[in-house]
Image: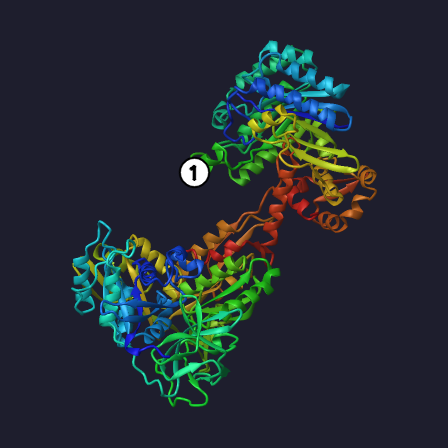
Amino acid sequence: MAYDRKLIRNFCIIAHIDHGKSTLADRMLELTDTVALRDMEAQLLDTMDIERERGITIKSSPVRMFYTHADGKRYMFNLIDTPGHVDFTYEVSRSLAACEGAVLVVDATQGIEAQTLANVYLALDNALEIVPVVNKIDLPSADPERTIHEIEDVIGFPAEDAPRISAKLGTNVADVLARVVELVPPPGGDRSAPLRALIFDSIYDNYKGVLCYVRIKEGSVRAGTRIRSMATGAEFDVTEVGVFMPQLRVTDSLEAGEVGYVAASIKTVSETKVGDTLTDVANPAREPLPGYKHINPMVFCGIYPADGADYENLKEALEKLALNDASLSYEPETSQALGFGFRCGFLGLLHMEIIQERLEREFDLDLVTTAPSVIYKVVRINGAELSIDNPSNLPPAAEIDYMEEPMVNANVMTPSEYVGTIMELCQSRRGVFIDMKYIEEGRVNLRYELPLNEIIYDFFDQLKSKSRGYASFDYELKEYVRSDLVKLDFLLNGDLCDALSTIVHRDKAYAKGRAVAEKLQEVIPRQQFEIPIQAAIGGKIIARETVRAVRKDVLAKCYGGDITRKKKLLEKQKEGKKRMRQVGTVALPSEAFMSVLRIN
Amino acid sequence: MPGIYIHIPFCMAKCRYCDFASFADHADTEAYLAALETEMALCREALPQRLYDTVFLGGGTPSVLPEGAVSRVLEALTRKFRVTPDAEITLEANPGTLAADKLFEYRSAGVNRLSLGLQSANDRLLKKLGRIHTYAQFLESFRLARETGFDNVSADIMYGLPGQTPEDHLDTIEKLASLGPEHISAYSLILEENTPLYTDVTGGAQSLPDEDAAYEMHRQGIALLEARGYRRYEISNFARPGCESRHNLNYWNNGEYLGLGLNAHSALRIGEKWTRWSNTARLSDYIQACGSGERPFAGEPQAIPLAEEMFETVMLGLRKTEGVSDAAFRARFGRRMGEVFPKAIERLEKKGWLAEADGFFRLTAEGLDFQNLALLEMM
C-alpha cells in the first residue's frame, strides 16, 4: 500500500565542503535508527574512497529514513545527498528538482561560501523550501548569531529560528528533523496520471545493470512496467523497483512523491542520463519533466598509459568508469610523443582530477596526461568553423581568420584582507573585474569575468593558497568571445613534441614559453648529446634552453661483493628507461609532460 | 681461487657520506669478535671445503680494533679455513688509527697488504667529509707502513667532493703518486640517501661540483695517474704493473667468495648451483644469531639462474679494462659470450663502446664511462 503522501518529506542538504553535510546526514541516520550504530562508518553516504578523503560528495546517494515527530506521526524522509562542487552544477540542479526542501548547513566559524550561495539559488529556482541550520557551534570560534545575520543578509530569508547544532556531537540535530517536517511541504503529483519519473542519478550495478535513481513526479512504476526514456526514446522492461535503506530494498512499486530506484537491464548510464524523464510505454506522458539538458564536457585532456603496453587496460578502465559516469567522454587519439591514448572530456577540473585519480588508484594505472584544454572556436579564412579541444588539431595560423574562447562569470567570496591578492590573481589570469560587494563586515563577494582556459588548471589552488584557504569560488559558463590566441609549441632537438603544445593568449605566450622551456631543461635528463629546447609560435622561436650532454654513467664502486645492489640500480634504470617517451631523438620522462601544467 | 671477506663494522666516527654498516660505538666489539669466530665455525661445517687465496679485512675501519684483535681474527680464520701460504691478505686502515705497534702486529699476523683511506690531500675537504684525519696524519701512517715493512700499500681517494675543484683532485693524485704506493683507487663520490652529506646537499648546506667539473676530475685524474705509472685496470682502480688487487679482481671475475661478519655478502658454487647470500645488517641480530648457533642470514641463500649468472659475469667483467675473456666465459658456461649477447654486442660495437680483441670483449674508454648504459643493452 502506498505511503500517505502527507507524511513524506523529500529533501537534500546544501553545504560548502567541510561545513558538515555528511556528518549531519550520519547523525540523522543514527537518530532515525536507519543505520545501527555499530554499522556506522563515518560519513556513510560518501561511498567512494576519494569522496571520503576529500570530504566531498561526487555521486548522490539517496537514503530513506522514518522519523516519528512530536505529533506522533511517522514520517518518511527521503534524503538526497548532492554533489558539492561547481563541476556538477547540473547534477545538483536535478537532485534539487527531486526534492521539496533543502537543509542549508552553514558553518558558524566560516559563514556562507560562494558554492553554497550558488546552490541556494539553484534550490530557490527549483522552488524548494529552505531549512537553515547553523553548524559547528561546539567550536570556540563559532559565532552562530553572526552567521544567522549573514544568512538573512545574503540570502534574504528569516533565519532567527534556525537550529544551532553540532553535527559532530549530535547537539540539537533532532531539531533539524522536526524543522524538516514543519517547513518542507509534502510532495504533490497525481498517482493515477501517466508515469513521469525524474532521473536524478544513476549507477551501474554488476548484477542488476544500471540503477536509475528516480523521483516519481506522477503515476507509478513497478516490476514489469515497460518504460521509455523521453530523451532518447529507448525502451526497457523494469525488472525491479526499490528504495534505499540505505541498502537497496525491493518494493512492489514506487508511487508519485516517492524516491527510489528502477532497474531495467540497462547496460550503460549514458542510456538514461541525469535529468531524463522515464514514462510508461503503455500510458505515456505527453511532455517530459522540464530541465533536461544534454551536458557537454568543458575540459579536455589527453590520457596516455605511462607504459604503452597498458593501452588496453586503460581502455577497459575508461569503459568501466563511463558505465557509471555519463558525463565522461573519451575517444582514442594518437600522439607522436605519447603513442596511443585517449582524448577525454570532463565537466570541469575536479571531475578531471577525480577520473585521473580513480584510473590510477582503482585500476592501478600509471598515466601521462597532457595539459587540459577548453573548446576553442576557430573560424577559417574561408569561413568554415571548427571546434578545437586538442591544440594539435589547430589549423596553421595562416588559415585562421579568428578564434574564440569560452568565458565564465566567476564569484569569489573572501575575507576582505585577501581582496588585493585575489584581484591580482584574477588580473594575472586576464580577468575583467565586474564588481565587488560586501556581504557583511569583513567579507566580500568579488565578481570577475575570466577566460575558462585561465582557470582550468591551478586557479583554484592558487586562490586557496593566496587566501589561506578562506576564499571560495564558483563559476558559470558565459559565452564565447574573440581572442588573440596562439599555439605554443615546443621543439626538442629540432623535433616538435605534439603532447607539449598548448593554446594560449598571445600576451602570455612569451612568459609561458620561457617558463616551460626552463622547466623542461630541469626535468629532461641529460642524454648522450646536447638537446636544444625551443619554444615556438608558428615558425618563430621565442625561448631556448639547452640540456647539456651526459658525460658519464657508471657506478664508481661495487661494494664488497654486494652485487645485488648494483643489479637493483640497473633494473631501476632500465625500468625508468622503459617509461621514457621517445620524441625524435630525445627520451622524455613523464614529468616532462606535466611540466607544462606546473607553471605559475 | 675463492677469497674471504671479513667485515669489521667499527669506526672512530662515521663519515658524512657513508651508508655502510659501521658504528662509532665500540661497546659491542668483544661480543662481535666472538660472534665472528662462531660464524667461522658455522660456515666451516656448512660449506664445502675450498682453498682460499685472498683475505680482505674491510669495514668500517678494521684498524680501530684493539690490539691483538686482528691477530685473533686471522688465527681463528686460518684454523677453520684453508688459506694458501702466498695469499694476499689486505687490511683496511685509516690514518689517525694507526701506530707502529699495530702495524707490527698486522705484519706478524700475516697481513701483507694495507689499504689506506686518504680520500683527499686537502684538509678542508677532509673536514667537509667528516674524516677524522689530516693529510699530515696520512703521511705519518704511510711512512710507518713502509717502516714496518709493508711493500704493498694502496690508497683510496675520492673526487666529486663538495667544494672540490679539478685542481684539488690533481693535487691529491700528484702528492700521493710522489709517495709511490703500489695501488690507488679513485672513486667518484656517490651521494647516498640517508647520509648526513645527502641532507647537507639536498638542504643546500653543501654543494657538489657540477657534472662537467666532476667529469673533468675523472678524465684528467685518469690521465695523470697513467702518466705517473699507475695503469687503470678497473673503472676506479689503478696499479703498478703486477700490484693489482687480487681480492677485488676475483669479484670482477665473478669468482667465488665467502663473506663473514655483519652485512657481508657471499657467492659460492654449492653443488651445481651458483649461490648468493648476505648476512644481516643489524649488529644485535648478527650477535644473537651467531650466539644461538645459527647462520646470521639476511635472507635465504639464492640460487642464481644461469642467465643471470652470465649477465653478472659480464656486468662485473666489463668493469675491468681487460674486459671479459671469451675463453673463460666459454669454459664457465659452455657458450661464447658473442652467442649469448649477439644483438647487444653488435649495437655496442657500432656505438664504439665495445671492442673485441685478443679473445676479450672490453669496453672502450668511452664505453667505460657509460658502463651502466652498455649493460642495459644486455639486460
**Which residue appears at 55% of the width and 52% of the height?**
A531
Three-letter code, disc 1: Gly
Give residue A178's position: percent from left, percent from top: 24, 66
**Which one is nearer the viewer's eye here, A444 or A252?**
A252
- Whether residue B32 is visible here, answered yes or no, is yes
**For this view, does A276 lie left or right of residue A586?**
left
- Whether residue B229 is visible here, answered yes or no, is no
**For this view, does A456 lie left or right of residue B153?**
left
SS state under label 1 = loop
**Which one is nearer the viewer's eye here, B201 or A396?**
B201
Q: How crowded is mark 1: few (under 14 residues within 10 Å), some or many (20 or more)?
A: few
**Which one is nearer the viewer's eye here, A152 or A184?**
A184
Q: Quadrant of the C terminus of chain A?
A: bottom left
Count of numbered labels shown in the rendering: 1
Color scheme of the displayed model: rainbow
Give residue A170's position: percent from left, percent from top: 28, 56
**Which one is nearer the viewer's eye here, B271 or B111?**
B271
**For this view, does B146 lie left or right of residue B137?**
right
Q: Is residue A597 above or below residue A387?
A: above
Give residue B122's position: percent from left, percent from top: 51, 24
Give residue A525's position: percent from left, percent from top: 54, 49
**For this view, does A53 lie left or right of residue A169?**
right
Mark 1 = which residue? B203
